[in-house]
Image: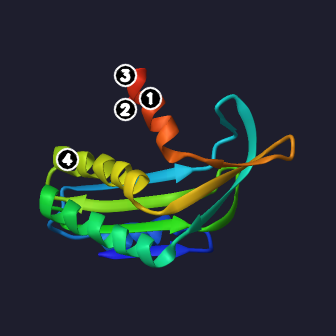
Amino acid sequence: MHLALVNHPIDTTALLDLVATHDAGITSVFIGTVRNTNDGQTVSGIEYSAYETMALHQLRAIAAEAVEQFGLCSIAIEHRLGELSLGDASVVIALSHARRTPGLDATRWVIESLKQRVPIWKREHYADGTLEWVDPTRARVAAEAEGVQ
């Protein structure tokens, strides 16, 4: 199990190497990237900050729950902090499992749990020069209302 908050680009290949095992029939990776729009506004970048001690505590809890609930072989999670540019990876989750379906289910469960439970905050930088803290629950509630998961 590898969990980290980092202030540098995430090395996805290194995380995949960390979860590689001959017991696994699947290696799944989720890469969250900075996109150029949100809620109809043009985004020029993002800034992440965290309550680091609690964030790492929650990441450990989520990873341990995922291992137990889904029977993972291995898991690695890194989340960036600081200022990110468009296209930068903000979070990478790599995990391995013996079987495809529970491995993919675990990947989705981990990112959704991370978004709900880990005290990491996102401030978007807009093309017009304004900055705004993003409520992570707002997008989830809107998506659920539209039937999107």
Q: Earlier in the sequence, mark 2 or mark 4?
A: 4
Q: Nearer the viewer, residue 91 or 48?
A: 48
Q: Which residue corresponds to mark 1?
A: 143
Q: Which residue corresponds to mark 4?
A: 100
Amino acid at pointer 3: Gly
Q: Position of residue 55 (x, y in %)?
A: 44, 70
Q: Which residue corresponds to mark 3?
A: 147
Residue contact at pointers 2 and 1, CB within 8 angstroms: yes
Q: Earlier in the sequence, mark 2 or mark 1?
A: 1
Q: Please, what secondary structure does the residue beneath circle 3 have?
A: loop
Amino acid at pointer 4: Arg
Quadrant of the drawing holding the N terminus: bottom left
The residue drawn where x is 26% and y is 46% is 104
Q: CA distance from mark 4 to mark 1?
A: 26 Å
Q: CA distance from mark 4 to mark 3?
A: 25 Å
Amino acid at pointer 1: Ala
Instruction: Report crowding for label 1: few under 14, some 14 to 19, many 20 or more residues within 10 A (C-alpha).
Output: few
Q: Which residue corresponds to mark 2?
A: 149
Question: Of the residues tagged 2 and 4, which is closer to the observer?
Answer: 2
The residue drawn where x is 44% and y is 33% is 141
Amino acid at pointer 2: Gln
* 82 in relation to 100, above or below: below
Instruction: Report crowding for label 2: few under 14, some 14 to 19, many 20 or more residues within 10 A (C-alpha).
Output: few
Q: Position of residue 61 (x, y in %)?
A: 27, 69
* 118 in relation to 101, above or below: below
Residue contact at pointers 3 and 1, CB within 8 angstroms: no
How is colour applied across the structure in the image? Answer: rainbow
Instruction: Report crowding for label 4: few under 14, some 14 to 19, many 20 or more residues within 10 A (C-alpha).
Output: some
Q: Nearer the viewer, residue 131 or 70?
A: 131
Question: Of the residues tagged 4 and 1, which is closer to the observer?
Answer: 1
Q: Please, what secondary structure does the residue beneath circle 4 have?
A: helix
